[in-house]
Image (spheres, grey):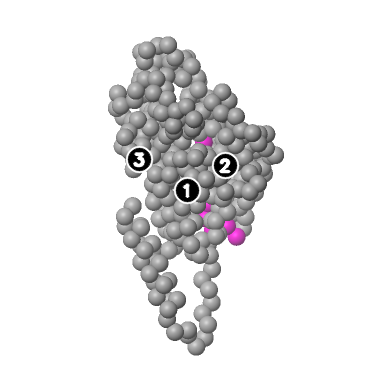
């Protein structure tokens, strides 16, 4: 969002001018930083090389990357905020709410093996928030829905079909409403826990971006840098009956708790896995050496930052 970036530039100029101005007779107290806690799964953490380099030393297996949107916003907003980023690849809603998580790093057999796997458990992400937290962002739900497992089954079921039919929809469609109902229930419980732990914090729920285009004819069957062996018909089903309803579940849960929903879907419509200027990588970012398994790249995280950062500023009353 150009207007937001312009505002950041003006903010930076004001800071620079203030730094060069004569010191006041009475030293002014430094403005307090707002405490921001970023929670979420791999779409928040970054995880893949196309979203930057991991910076945790030693690695904890959560694979937070330096070009993921929390880190981009942290650099952009500087001393205005104090970021605690506990997002973690493969996190479920339960891992945010109450459950210690066993991170997987980049261990995605049969596609990739992580030499440091297994990793020690990390605490439930909600433990990072407390009475002094000013704003919480949370992007989670896809792993509770089982989206990675659904994708893997669609790859297997579509293999050998020549791109014809909807084998994945035929096999899995009946179970999707129950999965979505489970996400809705757990998401509401999570928001209640976060409000209880941080009663004064503003909570921003972050939705998922466009992954599959409206026109699935853009997607080339057996292209492993797109959706490989998932049929166009199954891609249409995944978009309309799985991913779009998932965003609606998150949006409705946020509204029920008077929290704000940050929509990334509309702004990323023309930047799917199958678009030329993609903001989400396919099964591989570079076949056959760099597994991405359908995650946002740095451009996708920049788009998220362009929407989440203004929402944070509005939440803390900085206009």
Q: Is residue 136 left or right of residue 296?
A: right
Query: Residue 59 has which mark?
Result: none
* Residue farthest right in this picture: 120
Q: Which residues are magenta?
A: 132-141
**2 vs 3, front mark:** 2
On the image, the x and y values in percent for residue 210 come to 38, 36
Labels 3 and 1 touching (C-beta < 8 A): no
SS class, disc 2: loop
Q: Nearer the viewer, residue 33 or 107?
A: 107
Query: Residue 67 has which mark?
Result: 1
Q: Quadrant of residue 280?
A: top left
Q: In percent of the image, x 49 and y 30: which residue is there?
A: 289
Q: In percent of the image, x 54 and y 32: which residue is there?
A: 143
On the image, the x and y values in percent for residue 106 come to 57, 34
| Inter-mark Cα distance, 1 to 2 | 12 Å
Mark before the other along the chain sequence, 3 or 1: 1
Residue annotated with mark 2: 63
Q: In percent of the image, x 50 and y 42: which residue is there?
A: 46
Residue annotated with mark 3: 268
């Amino acid at each position: 969002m150009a207007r937001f970036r312009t505002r950041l530039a003006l903010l930076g100029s004001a800071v620079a001018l203030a730094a060069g101005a004569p010191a006041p007779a009475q030293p002014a107290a430094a403005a307090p930083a707002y405490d921001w806690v970023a929670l979420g799964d791999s779409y928040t953490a970054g995880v893949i090389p196309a979203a930057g380099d991991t910076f945790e030393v030693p690695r904890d297996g959560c694979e937070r990357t330096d070009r993921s949107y929390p880190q981009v916003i942290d650099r952009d907003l500087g001393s205005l905020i104090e970021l605690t980023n506990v997002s973690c690849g493969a996190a479920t809603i339960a891992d945010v709410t109450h459950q210690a998580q066993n991170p997987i790093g980049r261990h995605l057999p049969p596609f990739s093996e992580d030499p440091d796997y297994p990793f020690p458990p990390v605490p439930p992400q909600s433990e990072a928030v407390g009475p002094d937290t000013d704003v919480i962002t949370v992007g989670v739900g896809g792993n509770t829905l089982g989206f990675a497992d659904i994708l893997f089954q669609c790859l297997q079921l579509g293999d050998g079909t020549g791109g014809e039919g909807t084998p994945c929809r035929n096999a899995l469609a009946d179970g999707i409403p129950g999965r979505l109902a489970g996400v809705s229930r757990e998401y509401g419980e999570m928001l209640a826990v976060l409000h209880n732990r941080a009663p004064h914090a503003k909570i921003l729920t972050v939705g998922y971006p466009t992954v599959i285009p409206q026109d699935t004819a853009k997607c080339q069957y057996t292209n492993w840098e797109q959706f490989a062996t998932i049929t166009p018909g199954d891609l249409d089903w995944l978009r309309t009956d799985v991913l779009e309803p998932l965003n609606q579940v998150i949006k409705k849960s946020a509204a029920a708790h008077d929290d704000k929903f940050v929509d990334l879907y509309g702004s990323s419509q023309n930047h799917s896995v199958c678009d030329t200027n993609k903001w989400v990588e396919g099964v591989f970012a570079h076949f056959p050496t760099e597994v991405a398994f359908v995650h946002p790249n740095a451009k996708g995280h920049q788009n998220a930052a362009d929407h989440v950062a203004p929402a944070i500023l509005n939440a803390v009353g900085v206009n």
